[in-house]
Amino acid sequence: AAYFNAYRTGKGEKVTTSLYGSAIWVMGIQIALAQFGAKIPSTWEEPTQMASLHDYHTSDDEWIRICCLDVARSWKSLCRALGIEEYGDDPRFNTSSAQHENRRLGVQLIQKQIEKQPYAYWEKQLVENDIPFERHHMPAQVANDEQAQVNHYVEHVEYPNGKEVYLAMPPFQFRNAGNPGKERAPRLGEHTVQVLTEQGFSPNEIDALLAKSAVRQFKD
């Protein structure tokens, strides 16, 4: 769009983007669904990653991502943080290859511990033991995030029934174009009468078309 505008007008355009805005755009459907009550994320069936590089659910319905890539260096510290020191030298978990082979058992072991305490408790334990981790921001939380709203990564939309949500915006912005905002798409047949009128059809002609179901007009 910026290139076409420059080609047409001879004027350049500043285009900005961000990793956060791009992530919100990619997760746009989940962010919208979460505001309508969808449960995201759901529980896992078969872990695809090793236990020290996985997502875990706390007792207060938060999620933590543990990110220990160097298993040989960090496994004992992670066990100490989780209160399972007896597994620090367990050959099933103390190397990357062993963790991958025993990933279901390892994930179950850690999940059993983490689900006993709230996020704040585990945040303190993990920080004190120098364990890399991150708190997951759930899709519904992203929709209400001040940074996302102020930077127009999400835009407020109100539906005719009064439901208010924040929907993801494209992950790039044009300085001169400004913020176009976001509105709902028209309902199927919402503007039928208006369009036919603009095309020169009389009210009687439009009524006749509606009566024959040749066209339809949306009704609340």
Image (tube, rainbow, N blue to C red):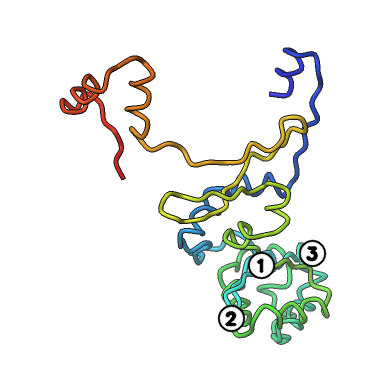
Residue 119 spot, x, y in % from top left: 67, 78
* Outermost residue, front side: 203
Measure the C-alpha gap from mark 1 to mark 3. Answer: 11 Å
Measured in 3D between alpha carbons, the distance from the residue under mark 2 to the one under mark 1, in whole angstroms, is 25 Å
Q: Is residue 210 left or right of residue 38?
A: left
Q: Quadrant of the N terminus?
A: top right
Q: Residues within 10 Å of mark 2 (few under 14, many from 20)?
A: few
Give the label on residue 59, or none.
Answer: 2
Residue 101 drawn above or below residue 155: below
Three-letter amino acid code at disc 3? Asp
Q: Please name the residue shown 46% across and 62% down the image.
A: 37
Residue toward you, 214 or 100:
214
- Disc 2, disc 1: CB below 8 Å? no
Q: Which of disc 3 and disc 2 is earlier in sequence?
A: 2
Q: Residues within 10 Å of mark 3 (few under 14, many from 20)?
A: few
> Closer to the camera, 212 or 83?
212
The amino acid marked with disc number 2 is Ser
Q: Nearer the viewer, residue 129 or 9?
A: 9
Q: Secondary structure at mark 2?
A: loop
Inter-mark Cα distance, 2 to 3: 27 Å
Task: Quarter of the image for the C terminus: give it.
Answer: top left
The residue that label 3 is drawn on is 70
Determine whether the residue tagged by mark 1 lies in a helix, strand or loop: helix
Residue assigned mark 1: 99
Q: Which label's residue is closer to the chain start, 2 or 1?
A: 2
